[in-house]
Amino acid sequence: MHKDDNQVRVRFAPSPTGYLHVGGLRTALFNYLFARKHGGKFVLRIEDTDRKRSISGALEKLTTTLKGIGLQYDEGPDIGGNYGPYIQSQRTDIYKKYTQKLLDSGNAYYCFCSEERLNNLREEQRKRKRPPMYDGKCRDLSKDEVEDNLAQGMPFVIRLRYPREGKTVFDDVVRDRVAIDNSMVDDQVLIKSDGFPTYHLASVVDDHLMKITHVIRGEEWLSSVPKHIFLYESFGWKVPVFVHLPLLLNSDRSKLSKRQGDVSVESYIQKGYLPEVMLNFIALLGWHSADDREIYSLRELEDAFSLDRINKAGAVFDIEKLNWMGGQYIRNLDVEYIADQSRHFFEEAGMDISDNDKYLKVINTARDYVYCLADIVEHAKMFYEEMIFSEEDRKLIEEENSQKIYSYWIEELGKKVGWEPEEISSLTKQSIGELGIKGKKFYFPIRLALFGNCHGPDIPTLIDILGTDESIKRLETCLTR
């Protein structure tokens, strides 16, 4: 017995079409978690046989995104493995061999119908409100007719000769028992006119040869399972366990698509949603834990994940929930990690963050107000840039009470270098008592001078970040009398 025969083996098999969809990330994540939970292997396979949709550079982007977000596969196109090649366009000789077996057994046939005829057939079926299906015109061509057409060089595809009677009944971990009338299953194209296989043939052949034990993929493939089972049985192969994940939905419960919002994982990462947040959030789209927790590390998900807790109902991609979770992570992870992850946003904004002590204090303050790191600069720039005041701000700055506060604080702060936050707290109480100005009339003017906004961190925090000299300088800028 081969050492892999009893090992869980799962695969994520995307097409290289430009970017990783959040639905694709969920499929990859659930496969990864199931493999890790059971000590199995997680395989990356690239399904690039649709040459029209494949985009140059997409494979590199895909592997970079998966690794960057924390999903390390065990076998794949860039790291190899015992069952390669892991790119389908490099496996065409394998598919030809198995296609010939299907032709020899009578479970597949040549179809010479023109694209024009097929288009007319589909149009006619649409008009009659029938599902578009091949009508079987070439299904029963004689051997001589087939050979004659081939000798003439007629273009062809190869189709599955699917049985037309009865039902196909199968088990799915999420859907339980599923029954589909065979009359509703098309004679699927297996080999296209360009010689490349369709998903249906290639995925079945590869899943068998790569010893995939569980096929975990999106619900949209559920109706294709009868064709896949027929292929397995035609070859005399064991059928894997099927797990079809519920649809991802927009807030209006329509299918999640790029027409209604952002669906690219790379886009969320570029905005500064932490990889940990994306994995945690996406894990809860269609799966729930036994104790209904919401915050999980990837390692905790590996322990908690199970297929039997995947929901049947579609899962809403709730951006507000994602933002809430993003804020939780940014506020609670180590400040040095958040600072490191935020650094390039500051550099792109042209800010000098060479004073690392100040930078860490800024991050620790600004992170209370954001859910993704792209926004952190907006809540931190006032510590690095010159204050710009509105006309309304100027009116408050120029009020008599405000000017008294500024004069008092400039004098007091100038008495020593290096104030501790608790000393600033004492000075705050002292100045309120001596000036007789309190509440908003005290806090708004001083916060506005130091921070550029009446609302924000407390005064000890502001002066601790800015330092004594910069604080005095800012107060002096507002002193007009």
Image (cartoon, helix red, strand yellow):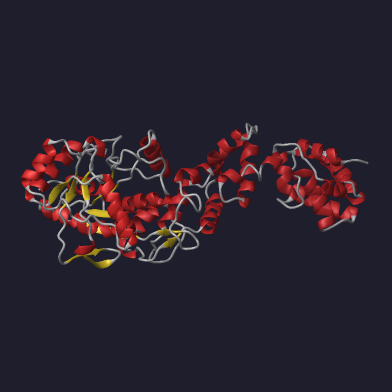
* Horizontal arrangement in the rendering, residue 328 relative to residue 201 (left or right): right
Q: Is residue 217 left or right of residue 181?
A: right
Number of on-image labels: 0
Q: Could you say where residue 125 lies in the image, as x and y percent from the top left?
A: 30, 59
What is the x, y in percent for residue 451? 75, 45
Residue 218 visible in image: no
Residue found 27% across the figure and 38% down from its top: 87
Q: What is the quadrant of residue 81 in the picture?
A: top left
Residue 293, image quadrant: bottom left
Residue shown at 31% from the left, 52% from the top: 31
Q: Work out whether 30 lies above or below 45.
A: below
- Quadrant for the C terminus in the image: top right
Viewer-nearest residue: 427 or 327: 327
Q: Position of residue 200 (x, y in %)?
A: 23, 49
Q: Pinpoint residue 46: horizontal percent, then vertical percent.
A: 30, 41
For the residue pair 326 and 44, the one nearer the viewer reads as: 44
Q: Which of 139 and 440 is in front in this view?
A: 139
Is 7 drawn above or below residue 127 in the view shown? Answer: above
Residue 84, placed above or below residue 396: above
One can see residue 361 in this view: yes
